[in-house]
Image (cartoon, rainbow, N blue to C red):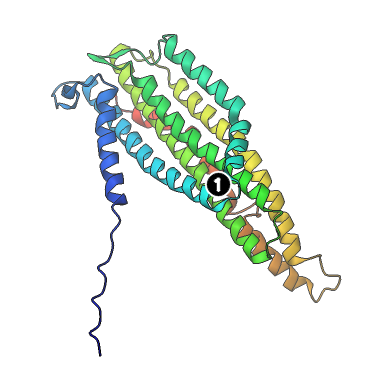
Amino acid sequence: MSAPEDPKPPSFSLMPLFILIGALVAGMGASLFVTGWRLRVFRVVANESLLPKIQLWLTIIMAQSALWVVCSFYLAATFRRLKTTAVSPLRHMRAASLTLLPTGIVLIFLGAKQYFLTAPLPPATLGEYTISNLPIFGGIGMLVAGWAVWQMYMVRSVWDSEFDLPWDDGQKIMRYVQLREDALRLLFIAGIVLALGTVAGAALRNAVNADRGPNYFPEEYVIIYGALYSLLLLIAYVPVYATFFATGVKLRETLCGERPASAAGFKQWKEARDAVNEALGLTLSGAAALGPPLAALLPVFSGWAVSLLSAKK
């Protein structure tokens, strides 16, 4: 009788460690990048009103960078899974790109205009620090949010093509739920990235006004940017929602059938229909229905944080 083999040692993924290191490096690097690579910005000085406000802003900059790293790892993993599981992934990538092309051109034009035509907001300097790299930093955040929205449209294209495949009902429902959850997570990622950017804008406003005067950077601009981000996310999500809702209704009708003519079977049919509506996200009331709009409205809600950040002068 042979001796039992030694059990294999458990394998540990190094990915969480890479994400943590990447987030820390990105956070420190970003805070130095936007202030001209001057380490003295982190010094603690007594009887100074401007520097603590700059450091508060840089703290949020660091949080933004760390969030971008985490989101980028998740987006890369989601993209690989979509490419692996979808039929003709290049076709879906092309469909998502063509759908978002007009919006992308407009955003690139506006970003280039902001970068090449020097605007008074944000200023090129903040106290003794040069912050002319800030538009480049902000552009990276827009790219991360745009990548999430692009993948959301790729998910929509994948499901739109797979809905008519000759799968059984169980397979089709599982795929529907999986892709719909992917779309909701991608919407949340875009919303939280833009929301934290809006909070950073509020902290920057607080520092700029401490340096240039209380009315140099109006509060309304922060709220306006948050509202624009939310509006863009809502507009982007509507076609995705419409696709999943329309196909979800067809799946529900296939599963539940027509309304029974007799009152005896109505209760059972109604309970089954309600359960399917809940599982497929077809309900228009309750917490599940509020999730996507709240995710899209995160930027404008975060814009109100300007009142908290500027409460203490």
Residue drawn 65% across and 40% down? Answer: 239
Which of the image's four quarters has the N terminus?
Answer: bottom left
- Picture layout, residue 227 above or below residue 244: above
Choose between 244 and 3: the one closer to the eye: 3
Furthest residue in direction front, as rendered? 1
Could you say where residue 126 lies in the image, as x and y percent from the top left?
A: 28, 15
| Left or right relative to 249: residue 303 | left
Residue drawn 66% across and 63% down? Answer: 276
- Picture layout, residue 95 above or below residue 138: below
Could you say where residue 185 lies in the image, as x and y percent from the top left?
A: 50, 47
Furthest residue in direction bottom, as rendered? 1
**Residue holding disc 1:** 183
Could one spot residue 287 in this view of the protein? no
- Amino acid type, label 1: Ala
| Left or right relative to 101: residue 203 | left
- Picture layout, residue 199 above or below residue 216: below
Local SS, label 1: helix
Residue drawn 57% across and 21% down? Answer: 106
Q: Quadrant of residue 216?
A: top left
Residue drawn 28% across and 32% down? Answer: 59
Q: Quadrant of residue 102?
A: top right
Q: How many marks?
A: 1
Which of the image's four quarters has the C terminus?
Answer: top left
Could you say where residue 237 lies in the image, as x and y percent from the top left?
A: 60, 39
Could you say where residue 91 lies in the image, as x and y percent from the top left?
A: 61, 41
Choose between 246 and 74: the one closer to the eye: 74
- Picture layout, residue 231 above or below residue 160: above
Q: Residues within 10 Å of mark 1 (few under 14, many from 20)?
A: many
Could one spot residue 189 in this view of the protein? yes
| Left or right relative to 48: residue 261 | right
